[in-house]
Amino acid sequence: MLIATGTSPADDPLHKAEVSLPDGLVLDERTLVTDTATITGTAVLPRGAVLGQMNDGRYRLAVASATDGSNVPCAILANISDVTSGDVEGGVYLGGSVHVACLTFDPSITPLNAQAALRRYGIFVKGLPATL
């Protein structure tokens, strides 16, 4: 598994979204949309963290009470990112199908809320119980 540390040039493999991990996060590689983005926060974020985009374009763990734009889930973190020492460049999934069991949410974001928000961005969360 790769960890984005922010210490490498942009073409370093640490900044590429790793798709072929057997962890079950990505359900269909053919529909996956990836990009490199600036990740911010104060912790080590795991692969599969549900991210929101701040008004300045950086991504952080989506938190419902945020007022900087990151309250809306819109991306999934592709690799572990250690942002304890500052912002890093890391891979994000901007489209595709992912499994809910492999996602990490802030407690303020429910899987159902994230599923609805992410769907608008072309990210389809699978594995949630069916609702009527």
Image (cartoon, helix red, strand yellow):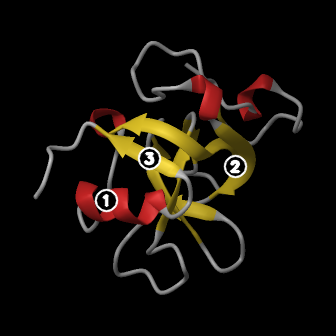
Rendering coords of residue 30 (x, y %) = 63, 26
| Residue at the image point whose x is 63% and y is 24% from the top | 18
Q: Mark 3 points at which residue?
A: 124
24 w.r.t. 50: above or below: above
Quarter where residue 64 is shown: bottom left
Q: Mark 1 points at which residue?
A: 106
Q: For the residue carrying disc 1, how many other residues have a C-alpha within 10 Å: few (<14), some (14-19), or many (20+)? A: some
* Marked residue nearer the N-terminal end (2 or 3): 2
Distance from disc 1 to disc 2, alpha carbons, whole Å, reads 20 Å
One can see residue 42 in this view: no
Label 2: element kind? strand
Q: Is residue 2 left or right of residue 102?
A: right
Q: In this view, does 17 lie to the left or right of 84?
A: right
Label 1: element kind? loop
Q: Which amino acid does label 2 sit on?
A: Val
Depth check, mark 1 against mark 2: the one in front is 1
One can see residue 52 in this view: yes
Q: For the residue carrying disc 3, how many other residues have a C-alpha within 10 Å: few (<14), some (14-19), or many (20+)? A: many
Tell which of 124 and 75 is nearer to you. 124
Q: Is residue 53 left or right of residue 48?
A: right
Q: For the residue carrying disc 2, how many other residues have a C-alpha within 10 Å: few (<14), some (14-19), or many (20+)? A: many
71 w.r.t. 112: above or below: below
Rendering coords of residue 118 (x, y %) = 46, 58
